[in-house]
């Protein structure tokens, strides 16, 4: 399957975005040889800054294989941004609607047409306190097992130092370095031609996220936590803490009412 031409809109976006990226970020890019020259494939990328899609897209644009991102559907209706999203072939994601599966089907179609679909398997900015990848969602694994296409793990670091997660202002000085490392394809062959159960998809997703995390360890020169941060576990723990706090508050309120009742002494012997 031949590669798709980059097209006008992607080149136009590059003309606009590349100059400020070059000014703001130095580059330390490795692993471009692992990006397939032909045919459809997936990249699985960690997410730690609102601007890291631009930094990563810059890296992959320079390989000649432009990524098609899955993005919130609302972005496709916003004037020039919407026109650029549509023109560059990005894939809208309709969350919590009857069209939610359309992104999955569109991603499969794009891969089968010989394109690259870029997944952020974490689904959102990492909430790990030290910026390590969280547990992943199963979308990338689903597409990979359906199409049997290569899955290229990609780790990045540096855009988050320019604009930390959820920060409103960039940290321009000193000039930061965008470090991007693409690894060899993740071996998912042991999952092929098996029933796509939740357990199978979870295991395949863990294999993908482990590969991304190992690359980030290489970039950072540090060891990641043994157990990835899981936002679902954190939400359950937060609910448990909230419930426990409410129970304590209710108990204290009951004790206060009981003490108040005991402090009321009946008035006796007031008659003549």
Image (cartoon, rainbow, N blue to C red):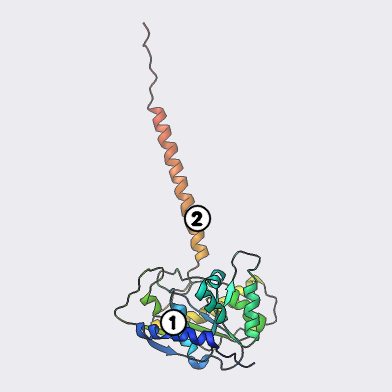
Up/down of 192 relative to 248, above or below: below
Secondary structure of residue under mark 2: helix
Q: Is residue 247 left or right of residue 170?
A: right
Badge 2 crowding class, 10 Å Cα cut-off, few under 14, some 14 to 19, many 20 or more, is: few
Up/down of 166 relative to 52, above or below: above
Up/down of 218 relative to 256, above or below: below
Where residue 225 appears, as percent x and y from the top left, is: 44, 74
Which residue is more in the foreground, 240 or 1? 1
Q: Residue lying furthest top in this view?
A: 272
Which comes sooner in the sequence, label 1 or label 2? 1
Q: Is residue 257 left or right of residue 176?
A: right
Where residue 88 appears, as percent x and y from the top left, is: 55, 82
Which residue is more in the foreground, 72 or 87? 87
Q: Quadrant of residue 267?
A: top left
- Examine the rendering and report whether any part of residue 84 can be seen: yes
Q: Identify the residue at image location x=62%, y=86%.
A: 149
Q: Identify the residue at image location x=38%, y=83%.
A: 20
Q: Which mark, by number, is residue 239?
A: 2
Where residue 143 appears, as percent x and y from the top left, is: 63, 79
Task: Give the residue at mark 1.
Answer: 55
Quarter the N terminus occupies: bottom right
Q: Quadrant of residue 114?
A: bottom right
Quarter the C terminus occupies: top left
Badge 1 crowding class, 10 Å Cα cut-off, few under 14, some 14 to 19, many 20 or more, is: many
Q: Nearer the viewer, mark 1 or mark 2?
A: 1
Which residue is more in the foreground, 86 or 123? 86
């Amino acid at each position: 399957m031949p590669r798709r031409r980059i097209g006008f809109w992607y080149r136009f976006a590059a003309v606009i975005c590349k100059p400020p990226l070059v000014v703001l970020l130095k580059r330390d890019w490795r692993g471009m040889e692992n990006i397939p020259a032909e045919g459809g494939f997936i990249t699985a990328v960690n997410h730690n800054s609102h601007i890291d899609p631009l930094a990563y897209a810059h890296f992959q644009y320079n390989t000649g294989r432009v990524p098609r991102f899955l993005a919130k559907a609302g972005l496709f209706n916003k004037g020039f941004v919407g026109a650029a999203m549509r023109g560059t072939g990005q894939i809208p994601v309709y969350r919590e609607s009857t069209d939610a599966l359309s992104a999955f089907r569109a991603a499969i179609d794009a891969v089968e047409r010989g394109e690259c679909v870029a997944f952020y398997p974490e689904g959102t900015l990492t909430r790990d306190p030290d910026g390590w990848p969280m547990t992943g969602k199963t979308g990338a694994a689903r597409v990979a097992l359906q199409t049997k296409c290569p899955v290229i793990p990609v780790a990045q670091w540096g855009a988050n130092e320019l604009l930390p997660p959820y920060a409103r202002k960039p940290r321009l000085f000193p000039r930061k370095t965008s470090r991007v490392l693409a690894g060899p394809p993740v071996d998912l062959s042991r999952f092929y031609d098996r029933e796509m159960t939740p357990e199978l998809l979870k295991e395949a997703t863990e294999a993908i996220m482990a590969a991304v995390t190992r690359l980030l360890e290489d970039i950072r020169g540090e060891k990641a936590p043994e157990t990835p941060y899981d936002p679902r576990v954190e939400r359950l723990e937060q609910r448990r803490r909230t419930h426990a706090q409410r129970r304590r508050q209710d108990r204290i309120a009951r004790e206060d009412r009981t003490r108040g009742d005991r402090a009321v002494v009946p008035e006796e012997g007031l008659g003549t």
